[in-house]
């Protein structure tokens, strides 16, 4: 089954690939690797802002991370022209806007990790970092960057 068909089966619609907010490119390809710049948590209503452990619960953070994942996949599609060219998700690096005593960063980033496996199956399993940040750009709750292997 093609990845586009898988997305349709799951009822997932990708957002438009977000434009860069500063002086960088949204993705860079080197050989068979695509490096996707950090995607911040946003949905159709705008930025998803919050600080885990202060004014946002873990489940809401995971939902924000899932939205980052959708933006990562949208960027990947822009980079490759077809998601069927994806061989595997290599690595995610997730940053969680959280208080010093918040320790559930892995549960938050699971929102993105679970999405990758849901869409790409075993090829969606990846290496990962899930770390805390005292703040993130524009006050968003989550930012995630990714590396994908493609044909």
Image (cartoon, rainbow, N blue to C red):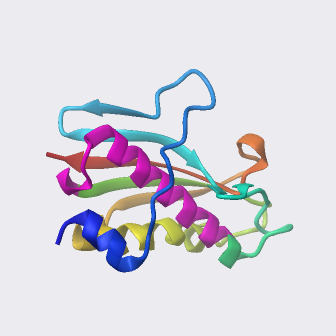
Q: Is residue 127 magenta?
A: no
View extreme (left): residue: 151
| Residue 132 percent across, percent down from the top left | 66, 56
View extreme (right): residue: 54
User: Which residue: 63% across, 64% down?
Assistant: 64
Image quadrant where residue 8 sits: bottom left
Which quarter shows the C terminus?
Answer: top left
The part of the chain drawn in magenta is 61-87
Residue 47 visible, this orientation: no
Q: Is residue 10 above or below residue 48?
A: below
Image quadrant where residue 52 sits: bottom right
Residue nearer the viewer, 96 or 140: 140
Total labels drawn: 0
Which quarter shows the N terminus?
Answer: bottom left
Residue nearer the viewer, 131 or 109: 109
Q: Is residue 118 left or right of residue 144?
A: left
Q: Is residue 75 magenta?
A: yes
Residue 5 visible, this orientation: yes
| Residue 125 percent across, percent down from the top left | 30, 68
Image quadrant where residue 7 sits: bottom left
Residue nearer the viewer, 143 or 17: 17
| Residue 145 percent across, percent down from the top left | 48, 47
| Residue 37 percent across, percent down from the top left | 48, 39
User: Which residue: 18% across, 39% down?
Assistant: 32
Q: Is residue 60 left or right of residue 92?
A: right
View extreme (top): residue: 23
Q: Is residue 106 left or right of residue 133?
A: left
Q: Is residue 149 left or right of residue 109?
A: left
User: Which residue: 78% across, 48% down?
Assistant: 139
Magenta stretch prevailing secondary structure: helix
């Amino acid at each position: 089954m093609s990845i586009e068909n898988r997305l349709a089966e799951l009822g997932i619609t990708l957002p438009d690939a977000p434009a860069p907010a500063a002086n960088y490119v949204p993705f860079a390809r080197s050989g068979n690797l695509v490096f996707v710049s950090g995607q911040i948590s946003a949905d159709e209503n705008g930025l998803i802002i919050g600080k885990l452990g202060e004014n946002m619960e873990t489940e809401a953070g995971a939902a924000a991370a899932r939205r980052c994942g959708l933006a990562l996949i949208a960027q990947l599609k822009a980079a490759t022209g077809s998601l069927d060219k994806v061989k595997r998700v290599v690595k995610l690096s997730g940053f969680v806007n959280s208080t010093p005593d918040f320790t559930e960063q892995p549960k938050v980033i699971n929102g993105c990790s679970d999405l990758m496996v849901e869409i790409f199956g075993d090829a969606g399993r990846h290496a990962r970092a899930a770390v805390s940040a005292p703040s993130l750009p524009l006050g968003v709750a989550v930012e995630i960057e990714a590396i994908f292997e493609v044909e």
